[in-house]
Amino acid sequence: MLPIVVENIHKSFGDVKALQNISFTVEEGELFGLIGPDGAGKSTLFRILATLLLADKGTASVNGSDVVKDYRTIRSQVGYMPGRFSLYQDLTIEENLNFFATIFNTTVEENYDLIKEIYEQIEPFKKRPAGKLSGGMKQKLALCCALVHKPKVLFLDEPTTGVDPVSRKEFWEMLQRLKEKGIPILVSTPYMDEAILCDRVALMQKGEIMMINTPAAIVADFGKPIWAARADNMYHLIRDIRAFEGTDSCYAFGEYLHVTLHQPVEELKDHLKAHKGLIITPAKAGIEDAFMQLMQEQNEAV
Amino acid sequence: MRQFLVFVRKEFYHIFRDKRTLLILFGMPVILIVLFGFAITNEIHHVKIGVLDNARDVYSQQMIHKITSSGYFEVDQNLRTADEIESTFRKGDIKLVIVIPDHFGDKFYHEKKAPVQLLADASDPNTATTVINYATAIIGQYQQEMTGKITLPLTINTEVRMVYNPSLKGVFLFVPGVMTLILMLVSAMMTSITITREKELGTMEILLVSPLRPILIIAGKVVPYIALSFIIACIILVMGFFIFGMPIKGNLLLLLAECGLFGLTALSLGILISSITSSQQTAMMISMMGLLLPTILLSGFVFPIESMPRPLQIFSNIIPAKWFIIILKDVMLKGSGLRQIWLPTVILGGMTLFFLVLSVRNFKTRLS
């Protein structure tokens, strides 16, 4: 029995097609990532799986229970962390945690081993109202609250959005440890650097899944060589590269531009010789390059 | 059960940690009572008057003394000529001018007729009418004292007795009214706001994805407000009784039970509002427009239902506040028991049940 099975889910809000023909499965003990920009439909998918929304078409099951018929069973088995911070701001850390433990018919002590590592980080502030915590601490508390009843499946909707880089790193380390404890996790994120930390990812855009694979395979599949380019005047550089007829794609990528070509790179160098401080070196493809290419292909197909 | 208790405790945390909520809950009743009790009143009390006494004899002095000693009036200015009347009215302090003619006493005894002119500032017609009525009554009394009992061959004597409220005190009307208003405000508005707040903050999303049953979520949110509205009802009763001398002739237990019932009616309305709205703003607007205004205007609290146009009279029957005010007045002033007020009680109970069923059915177990 697979923890999460999604088959041909469709969902529209009026004229807006939020999800189209979504299908995937999450394996036992897998950390599965939904990667995509804002508006890709990630939160809608989470809400359907958390039994909060009904899909227009298609079926989905969590832990073998249907999300429509057996929604009551699912609600007692999943841990759900919505995209927006949704705890009681006027209650302290301790009160929030105890409250959520109780409404799930358990106590903090009973499952303390599961949340211990995370809770210890915020414990010094346990008398502080949740609304007065920093972004990273809020997310740690929310994770504690989602975990306190020892869920069989964990849904985390953009848990690291609005969190500083250090806390983000810590948060993902926690997810790795939870995964080791055998809890299947479905997590969404708009950050590409987090995608490589998942076992498998689904790249989403405009309500559709463009590709599902392991991050390594997605990168390996990226067939073309990538060139990293930079010059003193980056603005003119990006304009000139995009104007060059041999360019397939050109995106800003940190302090470099990532460029793919269907003509030899020497011709590009020739085209750009007026630029000062021009550097063009071969680069390794990242998951972001793959995503950008898929996005471009999808946009061109429409 | 433990889940439920923890939920209720959480709700109390919300209430006691939010100063604005506390202010509305406990500041509002006191302010309203004081406002209605001391400021907004149509009773006559120390109205300033001007006197143009052209006679200056014993009888005119006696009459003026009689008028001022009633406590309703106090002489602010003694005028000397009729020309001053206009200018004193214009200043606005004086509501009534009494003009006594020359040789007032002589005329009364020898001509058997002494005209006294009453001039009232009718820019506020209600006050003017009341002031004139009071003044006429006092002058009439004075006339009787002077002449002694005159026996006419055939007379019809009207003996007026104002039953249940002999001194026609406004308090007797506004204490039930304010109580209704406050219970409506606290129970309906506060519950609709507190439930929509959970929706707005996103916590409803988590509560729904929990084993808690919807009915338990509603009950947990509502129970603290039942308790609070009951306490507030008691505060108003105590204030009415000790500060304004409002009698409680009927059974106190029955009165409290009826307060509890009306609290429930208002709560069920609040839940209904929260089930059809998703933002605190809308919930507040609907409670204001849909509940508070009818409660003030159509319940008989401010305007008597009997003098409304027919369609509004019929419409007022679906306002729960109307029935509660009837119950309150009957129990407090007339000392009625359950036998006399069973009809409004049954109507209120029926409304409560109807709204509760409707709102529980309307409560969504999902987001949309």
Image (spheres, coloured by chain):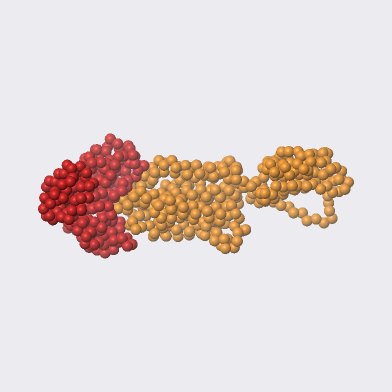
Chain colours: A red, B orange
- B82 lies above or below B324: above
Drawn side of residue B364 relative to residue A227, left or right: right
Q: Residue furthest top?
A: A124
Q: Position of residue B27 (x, y in %)?
A: 50, 42
Between B189 and B126, the one lying in front of the other is B126
The answer to whether residue B256 is visible is no
Question: Which residue is at a point 38% across and 45% down the rendered structure image?
Answer: B11
- In which quarter of the view is residue B36 placed? top right
Between A40 and B330, the one lying in front of the other is A40
Question: Which residue is at a point 17% across and 42% down the rendered structure image?
Answer: A277
Question: Which residue is at a point 57% across and 61% down the rendered structure image?
Answer: B312
Q: Residue furthest front?
A: A274
Drawn side of residue B248 relative to residue B141, left or right: left
How many numbered marks, from 0 up? 0
Q: Position of residue A201 (x, y in %)?
A: 18, 53
Question: Which residue is at a point 72% across and 42% down the rendered structure image?
Answer: B87
Between A2 and B144, the one lying in front of the other is A2
Drawn side of residue A234 relative to residue B24, left or right: left
Quarter occupied by the C terminus of chain B: bottom left
Q: Position of residue B311 (x, y in %)?
A: 57, 63
Q: Position of residue B273 (x, y in %)?
A: 43, 55
